[in-house]
Amino acid sequence: MGVLGETNQTVDTNKVLATESANRAAAANSTVATRSRRFGLTTFDIKMIGVVLMVVDHVHQMFASQGAPNWLDWFGRPVATLFFFVSVVGFSHTHSKKAYMVRLYVCMALMAVMDYVLQQTVNYDGAQLVNNIFRDLFIGTIFMAAVDCFEIAWKRRGNRTLAGFGGGVGAGAGARGGDERIGSAHGVVAGRNAMAGAGSGPVANPSAVNQDMVHASKHAGGVTRGFRVKKTLEGLLLLALPFILSLALLPFMTHANGTESGAMLWILRALTALDPAILLAENTVMVLLIPVMYALRNVRHSLVWQSVAIAVVAAGYALIGQTQWMMIFAIIPILLYNGQKGRGDKYFFYIFYPAHIAALYLLASVV
């Protein structure tokens, strides 16, 4: 009895030691993970860097006619690129891409209205209000949605699912169908047959399962081809939409000479506020950098490749002698991005951006 008691005590002691060792290991891992998260810049940090640089740039815009030095404008050159990057991250991780797009579109329209009302009521000639980064970001989401369509069409997820059909994986293919869409009849039937044949244990009828796999692959391939064409066309349409809307705007802009009145004037104002045409974007074709960075988001060393894309665009501006080449400095905080969200500030920028534009414009008009 004494020996048994000593044995049990030894076992209990070993359990305590093992538990303490596991706790220490978990604590060490937690510390390492915490240090890893702390290193680098979060999405919030990058956004705040962009906000500070943006304010300096807009101080120059509003007070340039009163002697603000031109070098203040240099601070603003990386701003759009930083916001483009943050938008790519946000669109990649948002719970609802549709809600994200709707929010930007509403802000785009409201910002255009605010710019118009401010200019009409304050009538400060020292600065022209064309500020509407929301339009650029909304157009960017249209382009990113196009990239999503291309990725869905050409990544062939259904074929990868079917490749692992045995051992109960057929349930996944069955639930989504060969092209991973809900309600694909062939995928459901094939999945059920495969599960019936495979079950949770040994395969009762391997030949039947193999036949179901071949049958599902053939029909899934047919569905995938049609689905692929559909999603590719959707992507092309989304990609072309901001350019099509620009072409639709041209006749109105061509005949605008500043003397319009009545219906024509209100049509022009409405189009300026509501039309997500790339021609009206604050950064024009530079917005195309957004889908490029979005397409590169999942490649190996994505931050490096996104920085390369930024550097290429910056080199183009340098060749034509524009200070926008300074956007290349945006790659510094981007390369320091640690993949963390940081502080929650979902609506901060939506409020701060129009508020600081209005405040600086009003201040410049009374100074």
Image: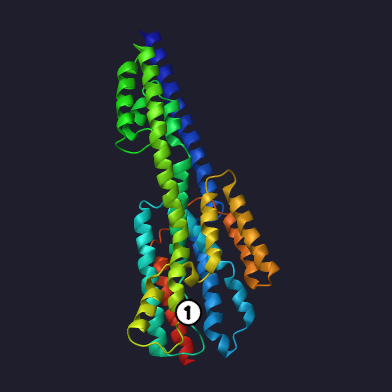
Relative image position of residue 219 (x, y in whole percent): 38, 29
What residue do we see at 41% from left, 22% from top? 214
Residue 112 at what x, y percent from top left?
A: 40, 76
Which residue lies at the image location 48% right of the left edge and 79% below the top edge?
254
Name the colouring of the figure: rainbow
Which residue does the image show at 42% across and 86% down from the upper left? Answer: 119
Identify which residue, 93 or 143, lies in the foreground: 143
94 relative to 80, above or below: above
Residue 358 visible somewhere in the drawing: yes
Secondary structure, mark 1, is: helix
Quadrant of image for the N terminus: top left
Considering only vertical position in the picture, is 107 above or below 19? below
Q: Which residue is mark 1?
A: 254
For the question of whether residue 90 can be seen, the reply is: no
Give the quadrant of residue 334.
bottom right
Residue ID at (38%, 79%):
269
Q: Left or right: 305 with respect to 159?
A: right
Residue 26 falls left or right of residue 64: left
User: Is 48 placed above or below 271 here?
Assistant: above
Quadrant of the image occupied by residue 103: bottom left
- Residue 68: x %, y % from top left: 59, 85
- Work out whether residue 17 or residue 223 is closer to the camera in this orientation and state it: 223
Categorize mark 1 by other alpha carbons within 10 Å: few (<14), some (14-19), many (20+).
few
In this rendering, position of residue 261 left or right of residue 38: left
Q: Nearer the viewer, residue 1 or 46?
A: 46
- Report the amino acid beneath label 1: Thr
Q: Residue 117: x and y, percent?
A: 37, 83
Q: Nearer the viewer, residue 54 or 321?
A: 321
* Figure quadrant of residue 194: top left
Q: Count the marks: how many?
A: 1
Q: Is residue 70 left or right of residue 191?
A: right
